[in-house]
Amino acid sequence: MATELVACVVAEGVSADSMTGRLTAFNMLEVVFTRKLPALLPKLFVVTIYETEGAPEHFHERITVFDPDDKVVVSSCSQIAATEHTHRSINALWGMRLERLGRYLVRVERANKPGGPWKQIGKRVLTVVADGHPLFPEEERGAKETVASSSPVAEVE
């Protein structure tokens, strides 16, 4: 494989600069704090970054979010044409409804055809916690404990 996933970022917003081509992610997420369920995420962006060596490569990328019971919450599929040294893919997932507390898996897969077979190439964890945001005083948020979160870089296999 000449094209390799090197990073994956999960964020609430993304902006691409039309003059420079630079990409900015806003509100990168590892933890979603909620006071009640279901927690609603109006939009979630999954940005994948690939490095390419050699000949151009075309493949399909699938982003799937699984709930703590391993049920699909949302999925998105894109066709990738990796022709430069790096390639970025931006997947917008709209109207996510997070029904349970716990760890949600954001899985990145690739295949040569839209129907697969699919191979997992990366993953991220998004944790949903019954708590207020940690920047607010504890008495205002009712926090009992802090939950560890994943790093903003994908686990690449």
Image: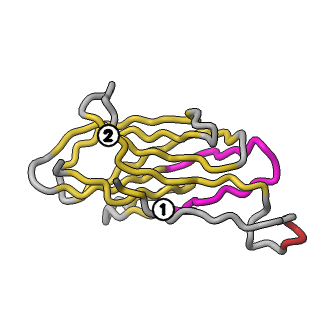
* Few, some or many residues within 10 Å of mark 1 (<14, 14–19, 20+): some
Q: Nearer the viewer, mark 2 or mark 1?
A: 2
Magenta highlight: main SS? strand
Residue lying farthest to the right in this orientation: 139
In the rendering, at what x and y percent does residue 155 appear?
Answer: 41, 57
Question: Which residue is depicted at the point 85% across and 72% down?
Answer: 138
* Residue span colored magenta: 25-45
Of helix, strand and loop, which one carries label 1? strand
Q: Which residue is mark 1?
A: 25
User: Which quarter of the picture shows residue 137?
Assistant: bottom right
> Above or below — where is 79 with respect to 138?
above
> Above or below — where is 49 with respect to 73?
below
* Few, some or many residues within 10 Å of mark 2 (<14, 14–19, 20+): many
C-alpha span from label 2 to label 1: 23 Å
In the rendering, at what x and y percent does residue 124 appear?
Answer: 49, 53
At label 2, the amino acid type is Arg
Mark 2 or mark 1, earlier in chain: 1
The question of residue 31 being in magenta is answered with: yes
Q: Which residue is mark 2?
A: 110
At label 1, the amino acid type is Ala
Numbered circles on residues, count? 2
| Relative side of 28 to 32, left or right | left
The question of residue 24 being in magenta is answered with: no
Question: Which residue is depicted at the point 50% across and 55% down?
Answer: 10
Question: Which residue is depicted at the point 69% across and 44% down?
Answer: 40
In the rendering, at what x and y percent does residue 45 appear?
Answer: 50, 50
| Relative side of 116 to 107, left or right | left
Q: Of 15 and 37, which appears nearest the observer? A: 37
